[in-house]
Image (cartoon, grey):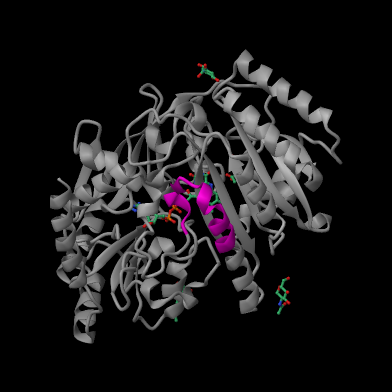
Amino acid sequence: MKIAVCILSVVAALASSSAAAMNPTTQDQFTKTLSSPSFPFTSSEVQFRTQPNKSAYFGALKTFNNLILPTEFPATALPFAIITPSKANNQGIERAVKIAKEYGLRVSARSGGYMSGYSANMAAVDKEDEDFLLVDLSKLRKVVVDPKKRTATAEPGATGADLAHETIKYGLAFPAPHASRVTIGGFLLQGGMGIGSRLYGSGVDNVIGVDIITASGKTVFADAHTNRDLFFAIRGGGQFFGVVTRFHLRLTPMVQNPTLTPSYNASTVQVDQVFAIFDRPQANDLLSFYAKFDPTAPRALENKIVFVVDPPTNNKQYLFASVSAVPFNSSSEVAQAQGKITQWYKSIPTNFATSDPTTYNGVVHGGDASWADSDLSYYAEDLWFPTPLDPRLLQVLIDQWDKVPSALSSMALNTGTWKAPTRSALGFDPSYSFCIYSTWKRNGTAAWDQQNKAWLEETVKALKPWTLGFYANELRPKKLDDKDYWRKCYEKDTFEILEVTKNRWDPENIFKSLQ
Ligand SMILES: Cc1cc2nc3c(=O)[nH]c(=O)nc-3n(C[C@H](O)[C@H](O)[C@H](O)COP(=O)(O)OP(=O)(O)OC[C@H]3O[C@@H](n4cnc5c(N)ncnc54)[C@H](O)[C@@H]3O)c2cc1C
Ligand SMILES: *[C@@H]1O[C@H](CO)[C@@H](O)[C@H](O)[C@H]1NC(C)=O
Ligand SMILES: *[C@@H]1O[C@H](CO)[C@@H](O)[C@H](O)[C@H]1NC(C)=O
Ligand SMILES: *[C@@H]1O[C@H](CO)[C@@H](O)[C@H](O)[C@H]1NC(C)=O
Ligand SMILES: *[C@@H]1O[C@H](CO)[C@@H](O)[C@H](O)[C@H]1NC(C)=O
C-alpha cells in the first residue's frame, strides 16, 4: 500500500513540474479563449494579470487580510486569470477547469480569503514562475434551508452570519465560525471549530455532502454513500481536490436560553457570555483554574481564555474568561456549571468583572466586531495541545503574552475538543486549540511588520514542544521550500489517505498540492 502511494506521488510530482509560465503567444490565446463571447462568464467576472486595467485585476485579488496588499504579492501568488462568478455557474467553472488544463495551468479556489496573507490564492506554491487560474467564490453566498429535513445547502462564500440568519428563521442552528464574517468555504473544508462544536462536532461533522468540480472538469457529489473517499478527505483536507461549489449541511434545533447574553449578532445567535476580565497578576490562578475546570465542564459549555492587550486602557494586559453556552442547548447541568464558575471568579479579587459583552467585543480587539476593520494585517497560527494541559505550557503562554509587540494582537485558548462524532480527515482529538493572532496596522515601516511577524514565529516555536499539530485553517503563507506545510496538520494515517485520494481524484496535481 505505502509503496504504491510512493510511486503515485512521484508521478504526481512529475506531472506538476510540467506546468509553468506560459509564453506570450500562449498567454494571448488563453486570454482570447476566456474573453470570447462563448466563454460562460461576462468580462467583469474575469480579470487577467496582463490586462491594462491593473486596478481591476488587483481589486479582484484583494483579500480580507491586508498583511500584504495584492500589489505586493509575490509572483507565486499572482494568478494569470481570476474568475469571480457573480452567480452559481458550475458549467462555467467546469469549462474553465478544462481550459486551464489544456493550457497546462493549475487551478486554485478561494471563498473568502480569510486565511493568513495570500495563502488562499496559492495553487502554484511549489515553485516560482508558474501561471495559474484563481476561482474566487466570495460572491456565491446563497443559503437554502429545508426545515422539514433539518438540512441546508450553502454556497462557499456565505458567511457565518449569512448561515445563521437563514437557519434561525426555522429555529435551527449550525456550528458556524465564531467570527461572524468568516466565510464557510475554507472554514468547512479544513475543519470548522464553530459555535456548539464541543457538543455537536466540528463543522465537518455536520457536512453531509458536497458538490465539487474535480480535475475531470465535472461536478461530482460526495457523501457517506457516494464517492466516500472524497467525502472523507474533503472534510478536513478539502482544498486539494477541486472547487467546492456547494455544501449540504445538517442542522440542529435551537433551544432558546433566555439567560444568555447575546453578542455574535443579537438577532441571529446567542453566544459568548463573558464572565470576567482578569488582570495580569491573576493569570496563573485563572489558567490553573481553567485547566482543572474545563475537562469536567459539560460539553454544552465552551470555555475560552483570551489573552489581550487593551489599547484604550494604556496597553494593559487582560485575560478574558468567557464561557459560551451552546445557543442550541439549555439544561440544568449547564446552569449549574455556569454557577460554579461565577462563584469562583467572584472569590478572587479583580479590578473589574463584567458580563457586558460589548466590552469584549467592541472595545478590545479580538471580539467579533473588531474584525469589521478590513484594514488590519494579521498573521495567524492555530495549534492543537493535548489534554490535560501541562502547567509548563501555561507558563509559556504567559511568557509570550508578555512580549506582544502590537496591542491589537490576541491569543485564545479554546476548550478541549471532543471525540469526533464522524470519521473525517480532521485530526487531533481530543485536544485544546490555541490560536495566535498577531494583528497590527501597517504604517509603512518594514521593521514594524517584521517585529509582529517575528513575535508570531517565536511564539509558535516556543509552543512547538507542546503541540500535537497545526490547524490547517490558520496557516501562515507557505514558503516555497516548506515541505511540511500541510503534513503537520494531519495525523500520519490521515495524511497517507489524503495522498491516495489525491492521486485518485487529481493525479495531475491540477489543484493545490499536498507537498
Ligand atoms: C477573524 C477570524 C476568525 C476565525 N474564527 C474561526 C473559528 O471560530 N473557527 C475556525 O475553525 N476557524 C476560524 N477562522 C479560520 C477560518 O476558518 C479560515 O481562515 C478559513 O480558511 C476561512 O475560510 P475562507 O472561506 O475565507 O477560506 P479561504 O481563505 O478563501 O481559503 C482557505 C483555503 O481553502 C481553500 N478553499 C477555499 N474555498 C474553497 C473552495 N470553495 N473549494 C476548494 N478549496 C477552497 C483555499 O484554496 C485555501 O487553501 C477564523 C479566521 C479569522 C480571520
Ligand atoms: C478599471 O477597473 C476599475 C475597477 O473595476 C473601474 O472602476 C475603472 O473604471 C476601470 N478603469 C478603466 C479605465 O476602465
Ligand atoms: C446582524 O443582524 C442584523 C439584522 O438581521 C443584520 O442587518 C446585520 O448585518 C448583522 N450583522 C452581522 C455582522 O452579521
Ligand atoms: C444539552 O447538553 C447536554 C450536555 O451538556 C446534553 O446532555 C443534552 O442532550 C443537550 N440537549 C440538547 C437539546 O441537545
Ligand atoms: C510604526 O509603528 C511602530 C509601533 O508603534 C513605531 O515604533 C514606528 O515608529 C512606526 N513608524 C512610523 C513611520 O510611524
| Position above or below: 482 against 496 | below
Quadrant (top left, top right, bottom left, bottom right) of the N terminus = top left
Left or right: 346 as drawn, with respect to 387: right
Q: Residue at the bottom extreme? A: 24
Q: Is residue 216 visible?
A: yes
Question: Does the magenta run of residues contain 9?
Answer: no
Q: Residue at the top extreme? A: 332
Q: Quadrant of residue 136?
A: bottom left
| Position above or below: 121 against 178 | below
Left or right: 228 as drawn, with respect to 487: left
Position in image of residue 264 (x %, y %):
62, 39
Q: Which residues are magenta?
A: 456-475
Q: Residue at x 30, y 48 (%)?
A: 495
Q: Residue at x 66, y 56 (%)?
A: 400
Q: Quadrant of residue 481?
A: bottom left
Q: Quadrant of residue 401?
A: bottom right
Q: Residue at x 39, y 64 (%)?
A: 121
Instruction: Work out whether residue 177 or residue 173 is closer to the camera in this orientation and state it.
Output: 177
Q: Is residue 358 visible?
A: no
